[in-house]
Image (cartoon, rainbow, N blue to C red):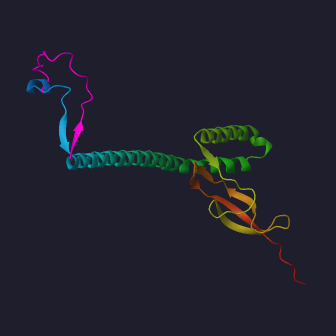
Amino acid sequence: MTRQIDDDEPAASSDAEMPDPNHPEGAQGAKPDEQISVSANEYEALRREVGEWKERCARGQAEFDNARKRLRKEADEAGTRAVARFVKPILNELDNLERALESAKSEAFAEFAQGVTMIRDNLRTAFANAGIEEVATDGAFDPALHEAIAEVERADLPRGHIAQVHRAGFRLKDQLVRTAQVVVAKPVSASTP
């Protein structure tokens, strides 16, 4: 069995036209309305081959899209890690400012304390603008975010809740930059007579 395949190009306006020698088909003398005879087996083989090529193209496009997404994600994560490495030493200086403020609570150091407070607040604002957030330290102890450095007996807090913050913790997006160092509450022990 033979299958006829029609060319989709419009038929020539007249048979008297000369073939264009610059056009590949025209140079060979083929007419646009000419039909090509192909056997059914050849037609099916060509149709399958076209389908395979379409499938390969679709797979290649999907692989390209996945690679682009993966590279974008890896670049974003690398940027986050770089910022975290940059910020970590600065956080220690922020701790030093906090300690300086704590020790300068007398009236003689009021202006000094005001200046240090302003520096600390500016640093915290810069961190917030860069997406660096302080880890929450109210409520229950979370080992993924907090580092327990001591326990203290507290009747006013449930066991395992944070009683005091020794050093603030910070995160950048989903990455923990530094854990918060905290003191955790434990029940008051019964006095022995």
Q: Is residue 24 above or below residue 148?
A: above
Q: Is residue 104 left or right of residue 68?
A: right
x 76%, y 40%: residue: 110
User: In the image, what residue occupies the spot 23% across and 45% down?
Assistant: 43
Q: Is residue 34 left or right of residue 115?
A: left
Residue 14 on the magenta segment: yes
The quadrant holding residue 184 is: bottom right
Residue 95 part of the magenta segment: no
The C terminus, quarter of image: bottom right
Majority secondary structure in the magenta region? loop
Front-lying residue, 190 or 40: 40
Q: Position of residue 171 (x, y in %)?
A: 60, 51
In magenta, the rendered stretch is: 1-24
* Above-or-below relation of 36 to 165: above
Residue 63, above or below 163: above
Q: Residue 37, image x and y in percent?
A: 18, 39
Which residue lies at the image location 44% right of the left edge and 44% below the top edge? 72
Q: Up-down: is 181 above or below 192? A: above
Nearest to the observer: residue 115 or residue 128: 128
